[in-house]
Amino acid sequence: MPANLPPEYFEVEKTLRQARTAEEKIAIMEKLLSIIPRHKGTEKLVALYRSKIARLKEEIEQRPATRKGPLFRIEKSGAGQVIVIGPPNAGKSALIQALTGVEVEVADFPFTTRMAAPYMMPFENIKIQLIDTPPITADYLESWLVEMVKMAEAVLVVLDASSPDSSAQLETIINRLQEKKVELVPGETIIPPEKFPFVKRTLLVLNKSDLRGAGTLLEELDILFGKKLDRLPVSASTTEGLETLRRLVFDLLQIVRVYSKVPGKKPDYESPFILKKGSNIMDLARQVHKDFAERLSYTRVWNKQGTINGLRVTRDYLLNDEDTVELHL
Ligand SMILES: Nc1nc2c(ncn2[C@@H]2O[C@H](COP(=O)(O)OP(=O)(O)OP(=O)(O)O)[C@@H](O)[C@H]2O)c(=O)[nH]1
Ligand SMILES: [Mg+2]
């Protein structure tokens, strides 16, 4: 076993033993690959998982046609992957179009979207991947869609705020996912790594808030679900609430952007390092360069607010969003 594997690796690795389907195993191995630091000592391990994943994919390919679904997995890209789900006709595709500026198939009849597809949403200086999906109903939930939810970092459930059916539809979605052992939780929840596929930070997006009767859904959700999940009224048509939505999607990811700078030079604000919230200087050093962590002598930090200015910090200093860091070797 190579040295220097972070504790998170072992937590996630444990869940591999409980995984039953090929899809679940792939999801967990992909997660492991994203955790394993890349250096000489881990090359074999990385290769091992890659070949296992390839074999499992072949196994899926060779299943009888009745069990084979469409592509169930979308390569992650950008600062995080957020899956957009919901009942038919809620405006999932329209919302993605409004957030990304990319044309998406939108129509005033249900089941317009048949396949999952990725889109990139700009947020300030980063991009977040949004996945458009087919609708979920009481008798329609693609099994590959469940696998995709398990792999995403966070979930948006889009509801039609003007429809009287929305709260019942939300309940259906929550229950159908629960049957598949996937639980939707509020955005601030800390999820232990071993629960990653089964517990998803979620925001309810109440779309079509431009239409009559849109206000009543908020009250209804309060009565039926309490404050269990966070909610935000928006309109894909008028773009109302979309700027707030971008920020909340970023918050759901629980990541921080860190700018690394060379002494005497300005930092590059266009390409921040993306780290999980709770990461420290050592985590950053490992990401910047594989030898940095060992060779690091001291570090200076500046924060966005301007209250910390070139402060010398220790290796366990917790990074905040938009900190600028100067690593000295
Ligand atoms: N008034 C209003 N109409 C909207 C809004 N967002 C979407 N729509 C309309 O709602 C209908 C459905 O939109 P879609 O984006 O196709 O909905 P969807 O959730 O992707 O639907 P499926 O792919 O069938 O699951 C279309 O006629 C949209 O023009 C909105 O914010 N306000
Ligand atoms: Mg759609």
Image (tube, rainbow, N blue to C red):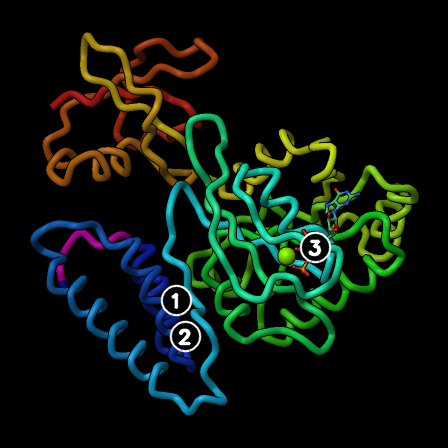
Whole-percent x and y of residue 258?
A: 35, 27
Instruction: Indicate which disc residue 107 carries.
Output: 3
Taking depth in this image into account, of 202 and 2 the one nearest to the observer is 202
Point out the stretch of residues depicted in magenta. Answer: 2-6
Which amino acid does the dot numbered 3 rest on?
Answer: Ala
* In the rendered image, the vertical position of residue 252 relative to residue 73, given as above or below: above
- Label 2 vs label 3: CA separation? 31 Å
Placement of 328 over or under 29, stated as above or below: above
In depth, the one of 295 and 185 nearer the eye is 185
Circle 1 is placed at which residue position?
Answer: 27
Closer to us: mark 2 or mark 3? 3
Q: Mark 2 points at which residue?
A: 23
Q: Does the residue labelled 3 lie within 8 Å of ligand 1?
A: yes
The span from disc 1 to disc 2 (Cα, nearest Å) is 6 Å
Q: Does dot 1 land on a helix, a strand or a loop?
A: helix
Q: Is mark 3 on a helix, strand or loop?
A: loop
